[in-house]
Image (cartoon, helix red, strand yellow):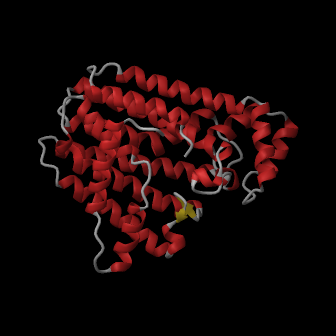
Amino acid sequence: MKLSPRIQQRVSILENAIQNFISVHEPRTLYEPMAYVVQAGGKRLRPLLLLLSCEAVGGHIEQCLDAAIAIELLHTFTLVHDDIMDHDDLRRGLPTVHTKWDEATAILAGDGLVTLSFSALLRTHHPRILEVIQKFAEGLLIVCEGQALDKAFETRDAITLDEYLDMIQRKTAKLIALSCETGALLGNGTPEECEAMEKFGFHLGCAFQIQDDLLDVISTNAILGKPIGSDLAGKKKTFLSTHFLSHANSKEKERFLALWGKGPLSQEEIEEIKTAFERTGTLTAAQNAVETGIQTSLSFLKQMPATEAREDLEALASSLLHRKF
């Protein structure tokens, strides 16, 4: 994603704050893996959304910087544990924590990150901080519900689109919605502004996840930072698999089910599935769903005052349509 100079400046502020928050001390077997995964970088989308949402309601960076650190640590915790459950060896082009160390170390590192997340929140001196902490706790539980649904769905050959949407609304959209709502709360937004920002993040989060599903098929290993086709190999229920199974003929379904979940796929097998997705209109349907989600999110953003921060959020949301990783 190409970011404006103003957004780049805020990303730099966030990056420095996040990096400086994590220090390595004894026991190193806990803190080194925590620092490793945080310092591996990433899009920093959630803390950036939090910061810009705060500014969009008239707040200032200083009011929400610790909360932005907290949301990134919370997100990173979910990634560490997701990688264990999904048996993923790479994340952002680097070995995952459980691959570089072991599963027990990764579990502890994740636990440490979620604890540090709440420690960062507690550094925020704001009249609404207890409300924010409550929303973080509630949001984290909803994310766990989404992950539980994701794992439960792996045992089934098919799910409905409504089941898929329920899963991603909990697993992915909730944390992005929480980021935007938290920023608005700490920026002293009105109840109407906070609700609008929460809905902006919610619909943006749904679009973000469907785009993720697409990238698993249409991206490359080098760009994605991990093997493409990992969702297919793990029999993950995605927008693509859900749409395809409800639109393919019996022969197409039979071939797909033979490949889906059998483990790592060859490039030829991925291309075969991609062609089948194209033939059934699945890729187009996913692309349309992403665009619809982003347009819906922008409709809520238009309820905010016309400011530079709102422009930045609009540009950031629109750029997700074209992201490659």
Q: Looking at the image, can residue 67 be seen? A: yes
Would you place residue 277 above or below residue 299 in this image?
below
Residue at the spot 52% in from the left edge and 66% down from the top edge: 96
Picture quadrant where residue 63 is located: top left
Q: Looking at the image, can residue 137 be seen? A: no
User: Does residue 293 appear left or right of residue 139 in this picture?
Assistant: right
Would you place residue 177 above or below residue 82 in this image?
above
Q: Position of residue 266 (x, y in %)?
A: 78, 56
- Front residue of 193 and 3: 3
Q: Position of residue 287 (x, y in %)?
A: 62, 30
Would you place residue 182 above or below residue 311 in this image?
below
User: Does residue 112 appear left or right of residue 99 in this picture?
Assistant: left
Q: How many marks?
A: 0
Residue at the spot 32% in from the left edge and 27% down from the top edge: 310
Picture quadrant where residue 279 is located: top right
- Front residue of 244 and 44: 44
Picture quadrant where residue 311 is located: top left
User: Does residue 249 appear left or right of residue 294 in this picture?
Assistant: right
Q: Residue furthest front?
A: 5
Residue at the spot 45% in from the left edge and 33% down from the top edge: 204
Would you place residue 221 above or below residue 199 in this image?
below
Q: Position of residue 105 (x, y in %)?
A: 44, 74
Q: Position of residue 286 (x, y in %)?
A: 63, 32
- Front residue of 210 and 25: 25
Residue at the spot 60% in from the left edge and 57% down from the top edge: 226
